[in-house]
Amino acid sequence: MKLFVSDGNPHCLKVLAVAELTGVKCDICHASDDERLVPFLSHPVRPVLLLPCGQHLFKANPICLYFLEVSGRDVCDLTSQWLEWEAAELQVYLTFHCVPAFDVHLFLVDKLQCVARWFEQVNALPVCQTVAQRVQQQKSLESLKRFLQKQPLPPARCRNAPLCNRAEEDAEREMTDEEIQAAGATWSRGLADRPTPAERRHPILPQEGKRNVLITSALPYVNNVPHLGNIIGCVLSADVFARYGRLRGWNALFVCGTDEYGTATENKAREEGLSPQEICDKYHAVHASIYKWFQIDFDHFGRTTTEKQTEIAQDIFWRLYDRGFLIPDTVDQLHCENCQRFLADRFVEGICPNCRYPEARGDQCDKCGRLINAVELKDPQCKVCKRTPVVRSSAHLFLDLPKLESQLEQWLEQSMSTGNWTSNARHITRSWLRDGLKPRCITRDLRWGTPVPHPDFSGKVFYVWFDAPIGYLSITASYTDEWEKWWKNPEKVELYNFMAKDNVPFHSVVFPCSLLGAQDNYTLVSNLIATEYLNYEDTKFSKSRGVGVFGDMAKDTDIPSDVWRFYLLYLRPEGQDSAFSWADMALKNNSELLNNLGNFINRAGMFASKFFEGRVPQMELQQEDKRLLAQVGFELRQYIQLLDRVRIRDALKCILNISRHGNQYIQVNEPWKKIKGGDEDRLRAGTVTGVSVNVACLLSAMLRPYMPAVSATIREQLCAPANCADAMFQGAGSFVCTLPAGHRIGTISPLFQKLEAEQIESLKRRFGGQQVSARRFSFLGGLPTSANPERAKQLLQEVAEQGDRVRALKAQKAEKTLITAEVAKLLQLKKQLAAAEGKNPEPSPQKGKKK
Amino acid sequence: MALMELASLEKSLGFKKANKYSTQGNNKTPILQSNKGAPLIGLVTIASHLVQEAAQPELLGRTAEQRAVVRQWLEYRVTQLDGCPKEDIRSILKELNQYLEDKVYLAGSDFTLADILLYYGVHHIMADLSVQEKEQHMNLSRWFDHIQHYPGIRQHLPLVVVLRNRLYTGGHH
């Protein structure tokens, strides 16, 4: 044990006395007052006891009590009480009220004789005498005085005082003088003569001399209602980037659409008694309306079920075939005799041959992630009828990936090194390559899909992962006949693909191989942006279990679309998975949107409105105003650099930083007070107001990609000129004065509403999954509990018959009311079937494309 | 207020009947009238006494060293945290944050009265911190969130939302 003491310190006196008294063995070291012995304390303290276990004790009284305990003495309540009083009250009084020593002595002797007597007695104790001598040495009063002077100021006992002075942030960047002057110079450039940006004119085609950017978002599968994770991973991210690109003056085209072929649609059609095309029409509209609500600004939102798709896909197919990149082979597949069809991968369930997970699906095991063939599953079962399927062989075509491997690698080398690929995309791609590429089957025995044109394979369709990415091309083709100017123009076009990480291998390996093999100068992806997963409150989104918010439900929450956008973008799972949390959403809305952003913009506008008759006042910039300009300019340049590299989440932080600086600026300068002062003060108030309003205008531009409606509202309220964003986003970004003195602004009103706790609680309950949403399962009257296999078999038969009946009626074009009635009956039967099988009526697929 | 804290502490310790307290002085130092004679004065003294009464002495520390550490943080609470001026809050948060870097609880790996009283004492500060500030003091926030969720501890205090998702990076590893 080591005890560190210093001169003139009465606390050390205390501790030494007790050490002496108890005879505890410890090394006594004299350390200068400036040495910091305890690593986590901000100021050096004495005495410090270094315990054998490595812990530091930095308070005198606990040290004393420790000595007492260790030497076997008891510590009673009364002792503790006195020590608490001594530390909390006496020390404070004696130290801070700096009563000269002899005054105290006189006072004691005079008025408090008991205390005086007690003091004399204690002082006379031998232990005290020895210790007093040791500590005092020669310069007793001097060192005591020095010690007292170093004590921190007296506590104000103001428990409810406003807290942390946010003006000092440790991570703040200091602005140099040059930067400050430069900011002032940039500011005074104003809008110069920048032309107003032209309206968008369709069709958008690549142009000479401009940066041509083609942006795609992974095509959502039509059958699934997208949940928040789907939305942030794909369309919302792409939308922010597209909006930003347009503000930067790039020539950008943003396309997307629904992916409509595949077995899930076929099954859904069978279930609902509609044709696959009708199902697609219905659900495409659902997707389109959801994305419209989220303000996703596609240049074109199409579908994969078009003639163009068939045309382009078959063209690529033939080119691959003619160049020898397709290998025919027979494949053993699982055929369900009962359902009379070859089972698609997702309709087989069994035990994974690799990790023994009992619910592995036919193309990929959910648990270990390994890609498998359905025939490899142990104990396979048809998911629909639960029967064991038989193995039958069927002829198929395979894309010879190994043959294309070296070409692929060459291209990847170039693309990854010059383009923006997220690290998970690089990682996943490299591991695919490392595992060695194998030929992949690109055909399937299904009816609903793009037909394989080769006569030997008639009756088959293309496998979704060959076919769907071609959807990007066909959707562009349905947008403009000159689609090849985008898709066969790698020199002039930069292609950005946005997706969630499970889609990466198909976009970085399979599809590029198809295009490389077709040898038609196709544009390949130069920037692959993949996100991780978004979870919902510690669990996964699940439509069947009613867990989580789905796109169609968001608008029923009364929370505005822009707030949803903000929160999802703030949560954008970039480096790792993130989790949606209602409580967190409310927190972010209230603290960042309302108190930080909204508060600043509103205050700035209100001051101009109230005190300056709705006009931007005269501004005479002083050093500190220019410092603010420099700070804001720095954040703006950061924002541009980050968004150029698709760091969407980080760029959002820049916006909030600027607004924070703005709030501090107003706080420090108190324009509401200065406005009541003399001329000079009023000028200050005017300058501060004017600068703040201009910062608000900049914020509206920076917010545009993230929260378009809010941005438009701010622009309206400030009557901002249309070329603001354009002017400030050129090059590396410059913060200029967009609203000069005299500019008239409009009516200012609050931008955001507080999200109350009760509101959040009730939303959390609604989407938590315990109570299933009434709208979907109202005819069920509660969750099914027990399974009834006998009844299930019977119902299966009835469902099949009813389904046939409905199809027949439709083919005959019978009366509408009749058809509707029969369809309703069919749906009822299916719900009952599900109940009898003991499961929820919608065995819907999990996130991502699994077919 | 010290009285509310003591009432909450009693509940956490499982007291069926609440004691009656009075106060003295400008600082409203709490006093517990005991039937055994002299009254007990002072938050730390009374709290320690309650712990003994509830037969949970381990809450004061299991070893002599741990007891010393617990006493130290209790004193810290009463002398440095309570009524500390605006300018010092920053350094207090930093100190606690750095101290808690490698510890689950203030006394190391055992939950003690020090955690309870320091939680009460720092609550109003934590409640007013911005998102960024909470992130800057990650260890403190982590400890705070842990204690406020500890069964029976939060009692009269509102839950402070400690973030799940970080917006600002840097400043912590």
Image (cartoon, rainbow, N blue to C red):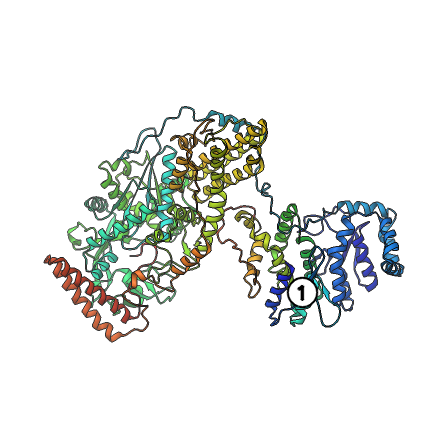
**For mark 1, what is the residue?**
B21
Which of the 4 quarters of the picture holds residue A685?
Answer: top right
Q: Quadrant of the N terminus of chain B?
A: bottom right
The residue nearer to you, when weighing A395 against A43, is: A43
Q: Is residue B124 left or right of residue A574?
A: right
Residue positioned most to the left: A812
Q: Position of residue A159 (x, y in %)?
A: 64, 52
Q: Position of residue A143 (x, y in %)?
A: 82, 46
A419 shown above or below B68: above
Q: Is residue A684 left or right of residue A120?
A: left
Q: Position of residue A153 (x, y in %)?
A: 72, 46
The residue nearer to you, when weighing A455 against A796, is: A796
Residue positioned most to the top: A193
For the question of whether residue B98 can be seen, the reply is: yes
| Circle 1 chain | B
Q: Is residue B115 left or right of residue A500?
A: right
